[in-house]
Image (spheres, rainbow, N blue to C red):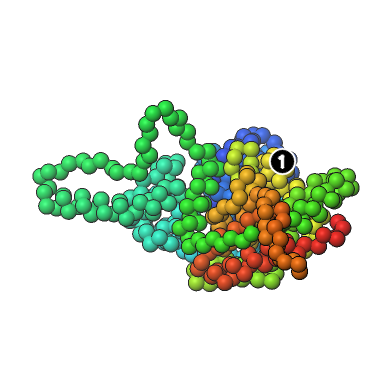
Amino acid sequence: MSQKELIMPKMGESIMEATILKWLKKEGDSVGVDEAVLEIATDKVDSEVPSPFAGTITKILFNEGDVVQIGKAIAIISGEGGQTIVSAPVTETPAKQEVVVQSPVETKVKEVVSAAGSTGGDRFYSPLVLNIAREEGISMSELERIPGTGKDNRVTKSDILNYVQNRGTQQAQTTTREVVQTEAPVAKKEEPVVTQSSSVTGNADIREMDRMRKLIADHMVMSKRTSPHVTSYVEVDMTPIVEWRNRIKDKFEKREGQKITFTPIFVEALAKAIKDLPGINVSVDGYNVIYKKDINIGMAAALPTGNLIVPVIKNADRMNLVGLTMAVNDFAARARANKLKPEEIQEGTFTLTNVGSFGSLMGTPIINQPQVAILAVGAIKKRPVVLETPQGDVIAIRHMMFMSMSYDHRVVDGMLGGTFLKRVADYLESFDTTREI
């Protein structure tokens, strides 16, 4: 009987570990090809891991709640045959195999892991935690003093980010305690640990964030800490697009069985502007700027829980408006049903968020790392506007919308940021209202 290893799959280029949420099979259970074996979670997405082969689960190597590095065996599956086969670590989910180029950041993480292993300590640190420690200049001895809230006192991403945020205060308190102990050893006394907390008074209901909200919170804090945010604004006359959509929407829905919203029109304008100004379609690695040749636009979508997820329209510049409409509607529907695949929320190069869908006129969005810009569209409202005509200025009722864009001032200055935002507005205002789709 042959034995094969079920490997923890790679769920994205920057993801180095995943947490086992739930085993859907137990030892002794049979499993078919592509049948789900367990549920895992990363800081990007929850996903089921299918088996790439049929057989019987003879050994489960990790428990629920364990954090497992990508490429490690998580279970042994036995099948018919006469030899033992150890499968090679996969670099993508079984449904989609592709070559993964190791980035400089991943190389540095492995170097840190190696260095950590040489210290002789028996406390486990995930590659993500070690990478944050390296970037923040936290030594191994300092890392070992950080209290952990994970399994077996493991330091989690939240633990180290909270430590970094309060590091100056904690170091000052440590220094003060050392001075007091040096000068007056006889007055040795246990001091209370000072932590940040909110004052809770009156009638209140305290609820812990769910796992996804915790990950979103950590990601937002990391983004603000990583990128110096600047936000620019522009006002767009959407009247031609509104009138065009009102004219064709019933015909389009009858023909395609799909509603056409404003979102695919925004995505189309963004893709055109990115082709004109590719300096906005980049990411940053230290002092290197990585120019992305693919235009992959993420669209923030609301989940039933109130959390947000960002499915990515790959190669948006190669799709026509019908194709973009189908992609937008499909992603929005499957996001609400929590049926997005891991690869569908990866590799975004620019993000669009619609704050207007909640009634807001404008917003100051936070960059979706490792991207360098995010564009927000506000609600479309009728307003009196001054128009210039050959006969002179007139006041007319127009459908107006504010757009805002936050960008990383390390690599996107005001000229590029402002020019790009205005270019998107120009494409929207010059929309061809005679086009048929």
Figure quadrant of the C terminus:
bottom right
Q: Tell me the residue that label 1 is attached to.
A: 35
Q: Nearer the viewer, residue 145 or 364?
A: 364
Count of labels in the image: 1
Figure quadrant of the N terminus:
top right
Q: Nearer the viewer, residue 5 or 51?
A: 51
> At 38% from the left edge and 51% from the top edge, which residue is drawn?
163
> At 35% from the left edge and 44% from the top edge, which residue is drawn?
196
Is 197 left, or right, of 42 in this rendering? Answer: left
Q: Is residue 27 above or below residue 402?
A: above
Q: Position of residue 372 (x, y in %)?
A: 57, 63
Q: Is residue 236 above or below residue 94?
A: below
> At 50% from the left edge and 38% from the top edge, which residue is drawn?
209
Displayed quadrant of residue 339: top right
Q: Is residue 90 visible?
A: no
Q: Please, what secondary structure does the residue beneath circle 1 have?
A: loop
Identity of the amino acid at label 1?
A: Glu
Q: Is residue 277 visible?
A: yes
